[in-house]
Amino acid sequence: MKFALFFLAFSVLVLSFGCNRTVKYKTVNHYSVFDVEVPENFEEIVLPNSIASFQLGNRYDDFYLTISSEGVEELMLLGIDYDLGIYSDVCLQVTNEMISSPVIVEEDKKVELQNDIDKKSYSITGFDEHLSRHVFYYLSFLKSNSKYYSVITWCADSYKSKHIETMKHIHSSFKEK
């Protein structure tokens, strides 16, 4: 009898570790410019070294999101007329300057269409000089008719497997208004 109870308790414990954690999402509207779905435990935070107007995260989970934008027309007035591939390359160069020995993976070799705007996504792993630790970033660059968006999620590299699917969900939920 004791063995049966022990076996049942052990089985439940093993199965509970094997189950994926369920993430509940909420939709956040940013000044009627865009909507994005984020985990319910995300809250507004101020991140050091970030100038993004949209900053959310959860310090307990060590998981963060920033979204910034630039007007296509404003950049054209400065003589900058990028397609999404060139814009992504320029943004990645800036990110690479903060990271030692970055490993960059282009998630899709072509520009994909998401919610009527072009999108390119990348993952980067490396040592972040500003944060003084190994970090995993998931980045998406989007271009609509009027704006470029940079959607960046990150966590400690050791939490990558815990957060990667949630990161992808956040990025795929982005919708310009």
Image (cartoon, helix red, strand yellow):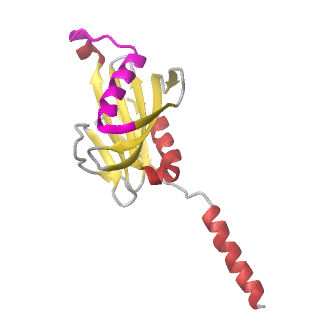
Residue 105 at what x, y percent from top left? 49, 32
Q: Main secondary structure of the magenta part?
A: helix
Residue 81 in which image quadrant: top left
Q: Position of residue 145 (x, y in %)?
A: 37, 16
Decide if residue 31 is on the left or right side of residue 42.
left
Q: Residue at x 70, y 73 (%)?
A: 11
Which residue range is magenta in the image? 76-101
**Residue 71 in view of the camera:** yes
The answer to which image quadrant residue 154 occupies is: top left
| Vertical relation: 6 (above or below) 87 | below
Q: Quadrant of residue 117?
A: top left
Is residue 107 shown left or right of residue 50? right
What's the residue at 62%, 60% (across, down)? 19
Q: Nearer the viewer, residue 150 or 29?
A: 150
On-image quarter of the N terminus? bottom right
Look at 74% across and 90% down and name the residue there: 2
The residue sitting at the bottom extreme is: 1
Image vertical order of residue 133 relative to residue 60, above or below: above
Please count the marks in the image.
Answer: 0
Quadrant for the C terminus in the image: top left
Residue 8 in the image: x percent, y percent? 72, 79
The percent coordinates of residue 163 (x first, y second) are 48, 50
Q: Nearer the viewer, residue 132 or 72?
A: 132
Of 123 and 134, the residue lying toward us: 134
| Residue 33 visible here | no
* In magenta stretch: residue 139: no
